[in-house]
Image (cartoon, helix red, strand yellow):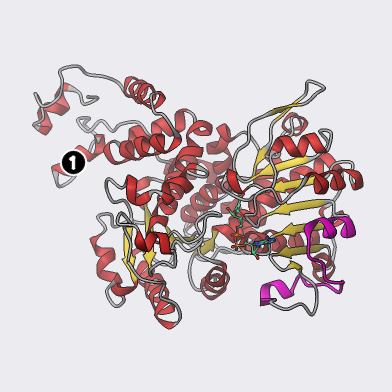
Amino acid sequence: MAFSLEERLQLGIHGLLPPCFITQDVQLLRVLKNYEMKKDDLDRYVFLMGLQDRSEKLFYRVLLSDIERFMPIIYTPTVGLACQQYGLIFRRPRGLFITVHDRGHIASLLRNWPEKDIRAVCVTDGERILGLGDLGCNGMGIPVGKLALYTACGGVPPQQCLPVLLDVGTDNEALLQDPLYIGLRHKRVRGQAYDDLLDEFMKAVTDRYGMDCLIQFEDFANVNAFRLLSKYRNMYCTFNDDIQGTAAVAVAGLLAALRITRSKMSDHTVVFQGAGEAAMGIAELITMAMEKDGLAKEDGLKKIWMVDSKGLIVKGRDHLTHEKQRFAHEHPQMRTLEDVVQDLKPTALIGVAAVAGAFSEQIIRDMASFNKHPIIFALSNPTSKAECTAEQCYAFTEGRGIFASGSPFDPVTLHDGRTLYPGQGNNAYIFPGVGLGVTAGAIRHITEDVFLTAAEVALADLVTEKDLFEGRLYPPLSSIREVSLVLAVKILEYAYEHNMAALHPEPADKEAYIRSLIFTTDYDDFTADSYRWPEDSMTVQSCKL
Ligand code: NAD
């Protein structure tokens, strides 16, 4: 109903719409009023996805009207619930579904995708969705949600984004038995056939969209995540958000925390609960930050300890993968996190094992007894998997704990009347800005330094003293568009300094250049003289739709 009379006449749709002409502001109002009538978060998710299908510009306008409110619906935690129920809530397909049986034909599947200029792909095989495990083909909700944030938070135009689900089967018995399941009904295919699928996929994407097409890996199980990252990182423009994006956001939180503890990264001893993708990525970036403090890499590694499902990782223990061995130190074996904390007296405790409630009252109180300001990050998602709540952290540390979580927690008011706002170590602070910067500069390979740059100069420096006083380790989510812009500009500057950008000539004003790329939610006025008519009128309609 926002089409003008002239547009309606030109499109031949006059009379097919109610006679009233309304603005996007009124459309927004209508959406918000409908949204308020929804009973639960899953209903809200379904409603917003329906809007995304019907009216993309309005969908993004709604998200941008209050990103803090809508992000937990289209992304963690609700997207986790949506993936669990994906077969039930399925209405229309979104994204490209490629199965292991499509080997040899991926290039032709890509040709079926209607857009030709794709700059960012987000891909999952659905094996480790958030902390919820193997959800197979239902994992499509994740790349769809992530790319919606590329646009909402980073401003990357939605038509340049492609969500992909690689379906190789699922080992989730319940899904295999579920009549509503939307994926292949067999166990996961592994080994050579799996690797061949991935190789073909990477090549087909870059053949079609160029070597600077960004491919973000998302929610792969860690047996594949590390392997694929090291295999492809120097061949393609790729990163793994669970490893590297998480690392950047967690390290940005730690860097902000250092301003409260008035210490350097190299002064800290960090214990991880969990030794998977998130832990390894964060640990790697912490050691890089320690190196910047002047500490040798091997000395930095010694300050980091990890606990996995078998207990403390120590030299000589069984079940140590190549990645874990780097963090295995000489030390007696220990089973429980309680013992580890009491023995090592860490300054920072980071939970990334998806074991709900793992930070017991005892552990938190112990942390508070060794440290004036214990750093306690309960990063496991969704909320139901968090190691402790914000309230528990603040209560058991008498408000001295520095807390961040993976999923959002409400503000907590302490006995002394002070209100603390838990930091949300949300990867969305990082990947949309990285995506914007990398695609803007046609950067071919994304090094670890790009993520440290994102954490240091972009994110941590944007946290004000007032934010820190209120317990916030990150800038307000409401400012995420500005955050992403700053991050993209810094990455572009870094890329040109280090000869990593393929875009030439180098933009003289990088900020202006990036701003010029950003998607706007305003409707195009295609009756204006300056409007160049696309070849088919369906495209003309979709400008408004
Ligand atoms: P992963 O599967 O790679 O790793 C999980 C690790 O937990 C493994 O090392 C496993 O051995 C360990 N573990 C399992 N049970 C354990 C137990 N009882 N005690 C100790 N360790 C145990 O998964 P991941 O990608 O590292 O993600 C882990 C969690 O972190 C998920 O909940 C995920 O949602 C969350 N995460 C949060 C953020 C964020 O907040 N920004 C980002 C990424 C991941």
The x, y position of residue 249, in whole percent, is: 64, 49
Is residue 84 visible in this depiction of the protein? yes
532 vs 263, left or right, is left
Is residue 456 visible in this depiction of the protein? no
Q: With respect to residue 520, does 81 lie above or below? A: below
Count of residue discs: 1
Quadrant in which residue 110 is drawn: bottom left
Q: Which residues are magenta?
A: 320-344
Quadrant in which residue 339 is drawn: bottom right
| Residue linked to disc 1 | 533
Is 338 colored magenta in this rendering? yes
The x, y position of residue 351, in whole percent, is: 70, 53
Can you say which quadrant of the picture contains the C terminus? top left
> What residue sits 82% from the left and 55% below the top?
338
View quadrant of ligand 1: bottom right
The x, y position of residue 94, in whole percent, is: 31, 51
Is 490 colored magenta in this rendering? no
Tell me if mark 1 has few (under 14), some (14-19) or many (20+) residues whose alpha carbon lies within 10 angstroms of its own.
Answer: few
Can you say which quadrant of the picture contains the N terminus? top left
The x, y position of residue 250, in whole percent, is: 68, 51
> What residue sits 34% from the left and 73% below the top?
100
